[in-house]
Image: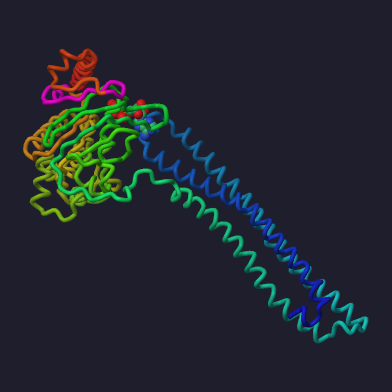
Amino acid sequence: MVLWISPMVGAVSIIPLAFAFIFIRKYNRRVKSLYAGVRKKLGNIGSFVQDRLAGILVTQSFGRRDHETEKFRENADHFYDSSVKASRLRNTYFPIVSVFGFINNVIMLGLGAWLIMNDSSLFSLGALLAYRGFWWRLQSPIRTIAQTSDILQRARAAATRIMELLDKPVSIKNESDARSLGSVNGAIDFNEVSFSYLQGKPILKQVSFSIKAGEFVAVAGGSGSGKSTLLNLIPRFYDVDSGSITIDGTQIKMVTLDSLRKKIGYVGQDHYLFDGTIWENLIYGDPAAAEEEIFSAAKKANAHDFILSLQNGYETQVGQNGVKLSGGQRQRLSLARAFLATPRILLLDEPTASVEPESEFLIHEAVLKRSRESGGTTVLVTHRIDLLRQAPRILFFDQGRLAADGAHHDLVEGCSAYAEAYLRWEVEEANQISVLR
Ligand SMILES: Nc1ncnc2c1ncn2[C@@H]1O[C@H](COP(=O)(O)OP(=O)(O)OP(=O)(O)O)[C@@H](O)[C@H]1O
Ligand SMILES: [Mg+2]
């Protein structure tokens, strides 16, 4: 419209606006990396706080409060510095964009007035008034463009952080032709399985064994020999590098993750309880479970009595905002949760590694009883000597290789590495018991 009223005044007064757009583009480029930095530093603060809160007892017990406060301050300072940098740039940007608008106004008024005063046919007082009206109307869109572009840059920095996470390749996923795993008996076969977390550093080396449906098998070996890794491969928390794992003869790679994991109960050393009641935690794997089933699972895991001894029984709040339970009690709840889901295959990773002797006995008893009564398969990582003696079969791992396979007395005689390790565990346990006494 301004060009139509007076092409010359219109063209000249539009020049600063063109500069304003070039400036906005330049600003966007610079502010983009600043906003990305602000987001990253905010993320650092978040993960620092989460990590240090989880380990607050360690911090307190080592008297490292001041050190952690200092580290938090460093993180906060980095965030503060980059936020101030971004704010400074933003606070120079908006006035500069306004200045371009102002220059546009000055040119239009100055040139217009000069043309009118010189009686030029190119411009009139009416046109000048019309221009003034347009200018006012133009101010608001220019400001909006500047503000929107700034908001977009901030949103882009936030979205980039989210996308970084979402774009991470999903390495464990269903094959395109994966089918659902139907009911299983629980036979597990490892066929020449090799696995490494990092290329060139094999953790499991050509491991082969067969576990019959309903068998109770203990897995033993030195620290770092690959026992937890072995368990993690069965529910496909990781995929094997070579070889294959089958359940009842079906390759686990060829079935859907959900259907596979539903058949497997996994109780690790970290017995996590969600924020909620004991009841809610127990039914996590089977929300439709009937009351008798829940009580029965809790009884089998030797948890029912201690639950009833709590003031609110099954309605007791546990987890982050709930009552503090002992390690053994938490472990027994984890067991009950796994029992209730009635998995055909139960994987247990050192379930008594950090529990008091009374709970240890109750957990061992619960696991052995469940194995006898349910008919399901149990694979238990342990180096507790009483369990090793009772286990009908032990898979002994040494540096990622299956070094021996058999009952305790066979291994003591036939595998010197096992005999040595067993002696070590015996001494360790004897020391632990004498400390407790
Ligand atoms: N997520 C991981 N990324 C890289 N390396 C790992 C990872 N988890 C375990 N490892 C390495 O793999 C090896 C075997 O670990 P694994 O946890 O299976 O041993 P383990 O026999 O269960 O030992 P422990 O008795 O101490 O529990 C170790 O050297 C360990 O450092
Ligand atoms: Mg382990």
- What residue is rendered at 7% in x and 35% in y? 372
Location of the C terminus (image quadrant): top left
- Most foreground residue, 404 or 192: 192
Q: Is residue 87 left or right of residue 105?
A: left
The stretch in magenta equals: 385-401
Q: Is residue 161 left or right of residue 376?
A: right
Q: Position of residue 215 (x, y in %)?
A: 12, 33
Q: Position of residue 418 (x, y in %)?
A: 21, 17
- What residue is rendered at 6% in x and 38% in y? 373
- What residue is rendered at 41% in x and 31% in y? 198
Any magenta on residue 388? Answer: yes
- Most foreground residue, 66 or 431: 431
Q: Position of residue 289 (x, y in %)?
A: 14, 53
- Most foreground residue, 385 or 280: 385
Up the image or down, 208 lies above or below 295; here it is above
Q: Position of residue 433 (x, y in %)?
A: 18, 20
